[in-house]
Image (spheres, coloured by chain):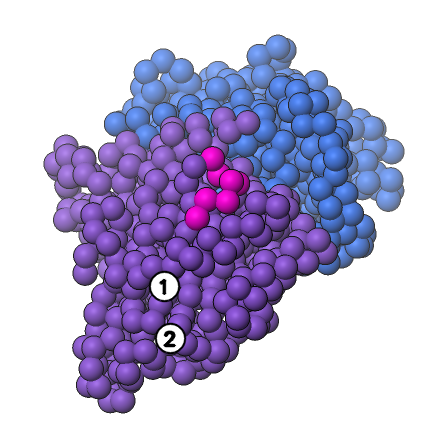
Chain colours: A blue, B purple
Amino acid sequence: MTPGPGLHRTQLPLGFKTSGVNSGVRRYRPDFGLIYSEVDACAAGVFTLNSYKAAPVEYSLKLLPSSNIRAIVTNSGQANAATGTKGVEDNLAIAQAVAQELTVSPNQVLMASTGVIGAFLAMDKLLPVIPEMILRLNDVAESFALAILTTDLVPKAITTVVELSTGPCRITGICKGSGMIHPNMATMLGYLLTDANISSDLCHTFLKEVTDLSFNMISVDGDTSTNDCVFMLANGVSGASLVTDQDHVVFKKALLDVSQFLAKSIAADGEGATKLIEVKIKGAANLHIARQAVRAITLSPLIKSAIHGEDPNWGRILAKLGAAEVPFEWLNNMNLKIQDHLVFEKGSPSDFDRALVKESLKTNQVNIYIDFDKGVFEAKGWGCDLSKKYVEINAEYS
Amino acid sequence: MTPGPGLHRTQLPLGFKTSGVNSGVRRYRPDFGLIYSEVDACAAGVFTLNSYKAAPVEYSLKLLPSSNIRAIVTNSGQANAATGTKGVEDNLAIAQAVAQELTVSPNQVLMASTGVIGAFLAMDKLLPVIPEMILRLNDVAESFALAILTTDLVPKAITTVVELSTGPCRITGICKGSGMIHPNMATMLGYLLTDANISSDLCHTFLKEVTDLSFNMISVDGDTSTNDCVFMLANGVSGASLVTDQDHVVFKKALLDVSQFLAKSIAADGEGATKLIEVKIKGAANLHIARQAVRAITLSPLIKSAIHGEDPNWGRILAKLGAAEVPFEWLNNMNLKIQDHLVFEKGSPSDFDRALVKESLKTNQVNIYIDFDKGVFEAKGWGCDLSKKYVEINAEYS
């Protein structure tokens, strides 16, 4: 798989087009984007569990799953959250205006927003540029990927080709990062587009499964925001469909790879981040505890700071695992590796070369491997280090 | 109540003495301390929920509740956690040596440690200074309060006098801070000493109740460490006991005041902290959610950073409450005040003067008041802001 940002053009699956335009909410760069499918697409979504959902989230989750989605509209700059009845009306007005221009029904247009909570949509800026946004639809992902960003440093998009028994299909993933971002913004948005022929129910099953192993396993600040969504659209234009068991396996694997690539790119682009942290746990006797433990490590400011300082601080990891309700018997049986160095072996500190391990942390990816040797369950997740830059960005906005 | 640190001598309750000596683990300052009761004291304790408990925690929790405790020994520098069988033996050896010098049973000596996880006790340094530690026992709290510190900037001790129907009694509280501290250290230790005559069962009841409203409502980094303990000792030397209902009320209120004073002093002394944050929630229809919401706010790096930057960022608070599973209906009915300024009223952003609110944050205590107007439950808790200094301290230790 080739990385998305910057280096090349990310070709979209057949029958999809995207665009991004500047509406004037942002000064220069695109802030209003459209994903368009030339034919009805089967679609599913997963949404924030935050009880205070933004207007576009409430709108889109009611439409899904669906077998005739034609578009997804996304604006950046205003989250349209905590905006009451007017927020609901504004959201609907944008959906209707885009639907009218595309000559589809508003029920075929999904919506997403990201930006400042409590800010109303700039209707006077967004509505007039809808025709231009449609005019600019094209077959690569870049301008849409750019239009949805808030404080991400790089756009995030990737395409992969999957060989099914019925022919090749494509999957494109596009996302923007969550958390650690400007005041009142903390949205993770993800879009998975494929030209395979997949029912909306199967889309939903796939989406839930891969999201749990990718977007749900990145920790930036530990919350789901008011606006988080991940959408999957399958328009079938390639003619390829999932017939054999092998087709299912191969397709799901590719979808997971795309999702994990995007999830890692979000973690690596966390605000102020200088290092991606990957945590792998194996040998757990319980999946829930394993996942919880991965998240606990990637969220810990003590561990994140230590990694920023390139300090192989196994004691903090051990204490965090204990606090995350990992049973004493597991910890007492644990092997813990930082990079390739065993720092804790079968429940006891190992006699490792501290200088060597410290040296191995002078890189942009830090791997933490834990083996409890107590069962068959595994979990994997990603986070980033905590730098002074993070505090600077988040404290000194006003 | 007068504050403990620095300004005066904190007189201990009758029949208690404490001391602190330098064993050589630290370079200069006291690192080994003793609390001594001249007569058998009723005692209770609450302990870390971390599954990976340090040797002194496992030891002390087996002895409590008890009606004949005579001493508590505490060392700082080495946590005696993740130290296996040798850690258990070392802990017992210290308890036995102190017991022998005091001519009491080891079962009458409680133990606590704080410091680096994985480091063994420096037995060659600690054992030889036990006689000196006993020789130096005196009737003020200061040298013990100093001996238990790790990276706290100030010792924390306070005494209050309580008038019971049977005469006056005293309560002294001593503690050290938790979290946000040097690699592998994250211990909160608390000691509540009274010369009132109270059974160990009642001590336990009181201790659980006040701990839930004080030490358990401070968030520094969100964990309970391997070594956290809070002890309560009642030696009855004042002759005063709890006879009337009013005695119970007055005593518990004083114990809570002492505990909350200590808890707030820990939050205010969080590493790198420049502001104490107090969060008060009222009008909740459910106590658990109210407490969870308070903790969520005091833990949020986004909110902590914003307060550090004196940014009245109500959107982050709203999003965090939603993520903490506060029901939408409560949020939609919420009044939110930052300092004395109403920033969100009955579910809508209020038209507040941003510059004025920002100005009001230029102080060392920030108050966040939330009223859901949905029920009778309240919760209160404390945290601190997140500064670059925090990252500096925690990243740049090695």
Horizontal side, residue B272 vs residue A193: left or right: left
Q: Which amino acid does label 2 sit on?
A: Ala
**Residue occupying the far top of the picture:** A7
Tag 2 residue:
B234
The secondary structure making up most of the magenta span is loop
Provide the secondary structure element on which disc 1 rests.
strand
Q: Is residue B345 magenta?
A: no
Is residue B310 among what the camera can see? Answer: yes
Most foreground residue, A26 or B295: B295
**Residue closest to the eye, B148 or A146:** B148
- Residue A66 visible in the picture: no
Compared with A112, B196 (above or below) is below
Q: What chain does badge 2 belong to?
A: B
Q: In this view, does B182 lie to the left or right of B213?
A: right
**Picture residue at 54% right of the left edge, 32% below the top:** A306
Q: Position of residue B166 (x, y in %)?
A: 22, 86
Report helix, strand or loop for mark 2. strand
Residue that numbered label 1 is attached to: B17
Left or right placement of residue B145 versus residue B240 in this view: right
User: In the image, what residue occupies the spot 20% across and 82% down?
Assistant: B167
A189 lies above or below B258: above
Residue extending furthest bottom? Answer: B243
Residue A396, image x, y percentages: 30, 26
Instruction: Please tell me whether residue A14 is drawn above or below residue B245 in the rendered image.
Output: above
Asked where in the image residue B241 lies, by quadrant, the reply is bottom left
Q: Is residue B363 above or below residue A137?
A: below
Magenta-colored span: B21-27
